[in-house]
């Protein structure tokens, strides 16, 4: 829930590519993104590289294909958010809490 307000200043700039009317949908996508990134981080034993690459890959369609649509971006962006919700839901159902919480330390140096 912290990442939504963290990005709020970007949505308050008045840019056509970030209409405030889509901020709630953006927050939903951020929550889904957090679930997916957590799953990837924990599933890879703590690899930040995978998480960073996934974040960049998830931002790519929004930046290249959706944002340039300007005022007509709402249906495409909402489709993107819907797909994020589906992906996060599948991960939660398929893996459960085991891969979405930290039960042991990651990247521990072996003796």
Image (tube, rainbow, N blue to C red):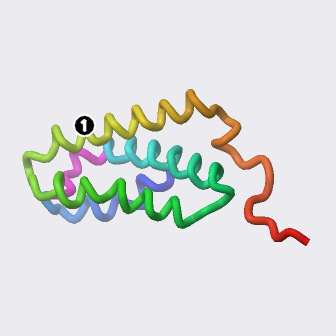
Residue sitting at x 78%, y 47%: 103
Residue 19 belongs to the span the image colors magenta: yes
Residue 100 belongs to the span the image colors magenta: no
Q: Residues within 10 Å of mark 1 (few under 14, many from 20)?
A: few
Q: How many marks?
A: 1
Q: Nearer the viewer, residue 22 or 61?
A: 61
Furthest residue to the top?
Answer: 93
Percent across and percent down for residue 98 are 70, 38
Task: Say whether residue 97 is left or right of residue 39.
Answer: right
Percent across and percent down for residue 4 are 41, 52
Percent across and percent down for residue 88 are 47, 37
The local secondary structure at tag 1 comes to helix
Residue sitting at x 49%, y 31%: 90
Q: Nearer the viewer, residue 94 or 16?
A: 94
Vertical position of residue 26 compared to residue 106: above or below: above
Task: Say whether residue 7 is left or right of residue 96.
Answer: left
Asked which quadrant contains residue 109, the reply is: bottom right
Task: Say whether residue 94 is left or right of residue 85.
Answer: right
Residue sitting at x 52%, y 60%: 50
Vertical position of residue 88 compared to residue 30: above or below: above
Asked which quadrant contains residue 64, the reply is: bottom left
**Disc 1 target residue:** 79
Residue sitting at x 25%, y 54%: 61
Quadrant placement of the C terminus: bottom right
Vertical position of residue 69 compared to residue 28: above or below: below
Asked which quadrant contains residue 100, the reply is: top right
Q: Which residues are magenta?
A: 17-23
Percent across and percent down for residue 76 are 18, 42
């Amino acid at each position: 829930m912290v990442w939504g307000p963290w990005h709020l200043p970007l949505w308050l700039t008045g840019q056509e590519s970030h209409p405030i009317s889509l901020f709630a949908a953006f927050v939903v996508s951020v929550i889904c993104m957090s679930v997916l990134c957590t799953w990837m981080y924990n599933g890879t034993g703590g690899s930040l590289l995978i998480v960073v690459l996934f974040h960049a890959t998830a931002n790519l369609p929004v930046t290249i294909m959706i944002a340039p649509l300007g005022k007509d971006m709402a249906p495409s962006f909402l489709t993107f958010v819907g797909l994020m919700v589906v992906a996060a839901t599948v991960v939660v159902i398929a893996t459960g809490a085991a891969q979405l919480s930290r039960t042991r330390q990651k990247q521990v140096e072996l003796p």
